[in-house]
Image (cartoon, rainbow, N blue to C red):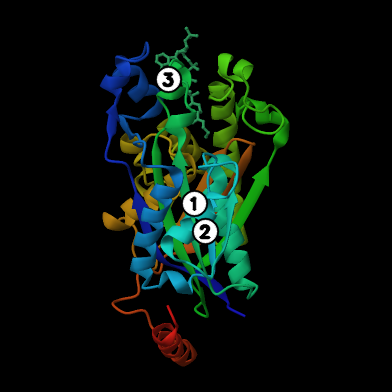
């Protein structure tokens, strides 16, 4: 059994269409000043008709696989964390698995709203460490623009679209994902939800008339709970990893609101300069926010080999959780294969060549 699950690849996809606060000023009664001062958001990406959740997931996933030097046909598990799947079913992960050519992978979606990526990471880590799989492609992806009421200024200014992915591989090294914690509280679920379109309240002329297919949120309540829950989960994950807050080199939180992030850092007494923030350019991309932030932290040199990383999120459900990992980074050049893997691949290539069309 592997000792650990290591992140060996990462990638993200963001739609090219940028929607600025100035543009929102023309759609709803809001202002750049209000949005910036209350949330930290300056702009967000909005998916085109072609850029579905699966479309963005495939692109983020492909980039992560390339970084890990892992062939799609060698992927054993695809998990997509999302609350804006292409369909109720089939799972977005199945669409992604097929499109990527990950023909031998199991595939399923995880829905824990903004905590979906950490939840998927925890599941993948557990399956790797138990020996059930050797690797997993974990994706967080959202197309929330299609679930927003563009007449509701209290929600439409907050969210954006995008996808981020990570490849996890079994490793006998002592580094990797060191702890994960997950929590939930369904008793306050109605504070952040999409009321209709599920089996309890299926789509009907009435639900559409009432706008029940859109996200509704009691923002102020969510705000307060988010700060406390994220700080608590962070402390728990750090303790479970056998570390203290001083050991953490970088905090990459879910990007919901810069004031929530500041509140968490303050509550933890964590140095703000060690917190990674990119919400100003993406808004809240829910399940995608942490993996996109990981990619940008790495690309800008904020995330380096050996760094202890703290991930923390809070979302609808309510759900919240955290993870601590030691960043390994990319395999330099070619991914080292075990002799068994090497022999297996050589055999596969021969079979591929002689297989009748
Ligand atoms: N532009 C201008 N004014 C707005 C506005 C907008 N886009 N949205 C709300 N307002 C108004 C409100 O109507 C309210 O007006 P009123 O006092 O006349 O009633 C006023 O601004 C203040 O609203 P309030 O809700 O108190 O603001 P806030 O400081 O709590 O910030 C949020 C609102 C939504 C930004 C904040 O509560 C938040 O970020 N919550 C968490 C949201 C989240 O990201 N959840 C996802 C899961 S983590």
For the point 49% across and 79% down, which residue is it?
Answer: 173
Apparent side of residue 65 relative to residue 332 in the rendered image (left or right): right
Disc with the residue nearer the chain's start (3 vs 1): 3
Report, in whole angstroms, how far the alpha carbon at label 2 lies from the one at label 3: 37 Å
Q: Which mark is first along the chain, 3 or 2? A: 3
The residue wearing badge 2 is 324
Residue at numbered disc 3: 150
The local secondary structure at tag 3 comes to loop
Element under label 2? strand
> Horizontal and vertical percent for residue 50?
36, 41
Give how far across and how far down residue 280 sits, in percent.
Answer: 32, 34
Name the residue beneath numbered marker 1.
311
In the image, is residue 111 above or below residue 188? Answer: below
Residue shown at 31%/37% (left/top)? 281
Image location of residue 319, percent across then percent down: 62, 41
Q: Secondary structure at mark 1?
A: strand
- Asked if residue 201 is positioned above or below residue 265 in the image, the reply reads above
- Of residue 261 and residue 95, the one placed in the foreground of this image is 95
Asked if disc 3 and disc 1 are in contact, CB closer than 8 Å, the reply is no
């Amino acid at each position: 059994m592997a000792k650990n699950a290591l992140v060996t690849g990462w990638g993200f996809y963001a739609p090219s269409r940028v929607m600025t606060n100035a543009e929102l000023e023309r759609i709803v009664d809001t202002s750049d000043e209000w949005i910036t001062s209350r949330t930290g958001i300056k702009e967000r990406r909005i998916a085109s008709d072609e850029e579905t959740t699966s479309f963005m997931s495939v692109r983020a996933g492909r980039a992560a696989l390339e970084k890990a030097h892992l062939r799609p046909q060698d992927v054993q598990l695809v998990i997509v964390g999302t609350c804006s799947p292409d369909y109720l079913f089939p799972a977005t992960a199945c669409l992604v698995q097929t499109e990527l050519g990950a023909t031998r992978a199991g595939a399923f979606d995880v829905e824990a709203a903004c905590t979906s990526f950490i939840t998927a990471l925890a599941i993948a880590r557990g399956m790797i460490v138990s020996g059930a799989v050797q690797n997993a492609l974990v994706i967080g992806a959202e197309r929330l623009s299609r679930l927003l009421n563009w007449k509701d200024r209290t929600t439409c200014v907050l969210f954006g679209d995008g996808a981020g992915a990570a490849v996890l591989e079994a490793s006998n090294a002592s580094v990797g994902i060191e702890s994960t914690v997950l929590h939930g509280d369904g008793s306050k679920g109605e504070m952040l939800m999409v009321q209709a379109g599920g089996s309890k309240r299926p789509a009907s002329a009435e639900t559409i008339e009432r706008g029940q297919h859109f996200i509704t949120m009691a923002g102020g309540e969510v705000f307060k709970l988010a700060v406390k829950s994220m700080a608590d989960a962070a402390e728990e994950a750090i303790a479970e990893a056998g570390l203290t807050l001083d050991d953490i080199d970088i905090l990459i939180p879910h990007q919901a609101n810069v004031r929530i992030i500041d509140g968490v850092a303050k509550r933890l007494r964590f140095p703000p300069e060690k917190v990674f923030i990119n919400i100003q350019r993406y808004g809240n991309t829910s399940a995608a926010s942490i993996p996109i932030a990981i990619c940008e932290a790495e690309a800008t040199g904020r995330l380096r080999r050996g760094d202890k990383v703290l991930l923390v999120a809070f979302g609808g459900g309510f759900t919240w959780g955290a993870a601590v990992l030691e960043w390994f980074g990319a395999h330099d050049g070619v991914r080292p294969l075990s002799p068994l893997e090497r022999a297996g691949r050589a055999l596969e290539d021969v079979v591929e060549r002689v297989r009748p069309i």
